[in-house]
Every structure is written in structure tokens, then in C-alpha cells.
């Protein structure tokens, strides 16, 4: 079994953000999908931004 190091955790976070982005596009939420897609692209340089954007979008949706 492989161990989860910082590099693989970052890749997993990027993939998770891409999946969230695809789901938003599928639900018809283009702006959220684009925001998550941009966050996934930035995640290689700024770790954790994809998770932060995803949580932010969920919070905004909940407060509506």
C-alpha cells in the first residue's frame, strides 16, 4: 500500500476540484464551474485553493 505524501495529496485535491467543476457544469452552474476550473488550475501553485473555493461556493449557496 502506498503512503499519502504532500505531492499525492495535492494531486488528489486537484482531481477533486476538477470533478466538482464538472458537476457544476452538468448542473447548469457555469460561473461556479468556471471558478472551480480556475481554482484547479491554480492549485498546482497555491495548494488548498480548490478546497477553499469549493467551501466558499457551498457557503454562498447555503446562505441564499
Image (tube, helix red, strand yellow):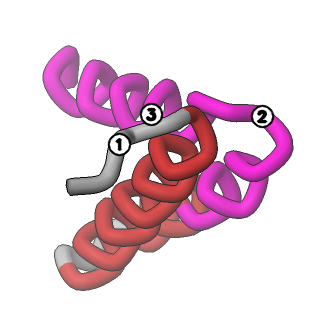
Residue under label 2, please give it: 46
Q: Horizontally, is 57 left or right of 28 in the view?
A: right
SS at mark 2 in the image? loop
Magenta span of residues: 37-64
Q: Is residue 15 magenta?
A: no
Q: Horizontally, is 20 left or right of 36 in the view?
A: left
First in sequence, mark 2 or 3: give its number: 2
Q: State the separation of the CA atoms marked 2 and 3.
A: 11 Å
Q: Give the image location of residue 37, x and y in percent.
A: 58, 66
Which quadrant does the C terminus fall into? top left
| Tags 2 and 3 touching, CB below 8 Å | no
Q: Residue furthest front?
A: 1
**Residue in front for this viewpoint, 6 or 35:** 6
Could you tell me which residue is drawn at 20 percent across and 55 percent down? 1
Closer to us: mark 3 or mark 1?
1
Q: Which mark is residue 54?
A: none
Could you tell me which residue is drawn at 84 percent across and 43 percent down? 45
Q: State the separation of the CA atoms marked 3 and 1.
A: 21 Å
Q: How many marks?
A: 3
Q: State the separation of the CA atoms marked 2 and 1.
A: 22 Å
First in sequence, mark 3 or 1: give its number: 1
The main secondary structure of the magenta stretch is: helix
Q: Quadrant of residue 23?
A: bottom left
Q: Give the image location of residue 26, x and y in percent.
A: 23, 83
Residue under label 1, please give it: 3
Residue under label 3, please give it: 51
Q: Is residue 22 above or below residue 5?
A: below
Q: Is residue 56 magenta?
A: yes
**Residue in front for this viewpoint, 26 or 6:** 6
**Residue in front for this viewpoint, 13 or 31:** 13
Amino acid at each position: 500500500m502506498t503512503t499519502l505524501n504532500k505531492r499525492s495529496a495535492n494531486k488528489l485535491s486537484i482531481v477533486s476540484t476538477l470533478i466538482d467543476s464538472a458537476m457544476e457544469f452538468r448542473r447548469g452552474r457555469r460561473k461556479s464551474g468556471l471558478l472551480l476550473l480556475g481554482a484547479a488550475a491554480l492549485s498546482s501553485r497555491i495548494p488548498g485553493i480548490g478546497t477553499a473555493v469549493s467551501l466558499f461556493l457551498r457557503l454562498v449557496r447555503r446562505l441564499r
